Image: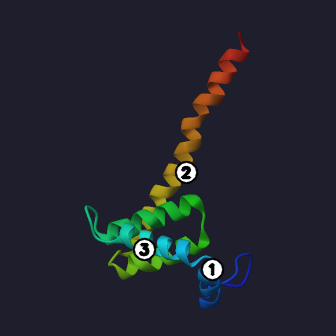
Amino acid sequence: MSDGLYPKATQEIYDRRRELNPQVNDAFQAFSKAVFADGALPEKTKQLIAVAVAHVTQCPYCIEGHTKLAHRKGATDAEIIEAVWVAAEMRAGGAFAHSTIALDVLSKEKR
């Protein structure tokens, strides 16, 4: 990750996070390993899901990390970008779907 708004994720930062709370850190690492292991979905698919979710949550660390992992697990550039487009549609779709709330309020205001 380049210099800018977010600091680079370094081994030193990783080590400090673990030092401050090793039990939770280790539990999270084990959870992550279990989640991304091949199961009903292969790891490649899980990494593509993670790429999409990372774009929805807008986490630059997750975008970088899961894009690399998806690629390493065999995802093509086209598959990765398609996952990003799915994320964009879902994010926009949320605003579209929630317009129901605004329309409901407006209909009640006219009464």
* 56 to the left or right of 39: right
The disc at residue 91 is 2
Callout 3: 10 Å neighbours few (<14), some, many (20+)?
A: few
Q: Position of residue 43 (x, y in %)?
A: 32, 71
Lower position in the chain sequence, tag 3 or tag 2: 3
Query: Tag 2: residue type?
Result: Arg
Q: Is residue 10 above or below residue 24?
A: below
Q: Is residue 111 above or below residue 8?
A: above
Q: Position of residue 34 (x, y in %)?
A: 36, 70
Lower position in the chain sequence, tag 1 or tag 2: 1
Q: Is residue 95 above or below residue 9?
A: above
At x 33%, y 66%, the residue is 45
Reading the image, the residue beneath label 1 is 17
Q: Position of residue 14 (x, y in %)?
A: 60, 84
Image quadrant of residue 95?
A: top right
Callout 2: 10 Å neighbours few (<14), some, many (20+)?
A: some
Task: Tell me if label 1 and label 3 are in contact, CB under 8 Å.
Answer: no
Q: Position of residue 81 (x, y in %)?
A: 45, 67
Q: Is residue 18 above or below residue 85?
A: below
Q: Nearer the viewer, residue 18 or 100?
A: 18
Lower position in the chain sequence, tag 1 or tag 3: 1
Looking at this view, name the residue that lies furthest to the top: 111
Callout 1: 10 Å neighbours few (<14), some, many (20+)?
A: few
Q: Secondary structure at mark 1?
A: helix
* 54 to the left or right of 40: right
Q: Quadrant of the C terminus?
A: top right
* 5 to the left or right of 42: right
Reading the image, the residue beneath label 3 is 30
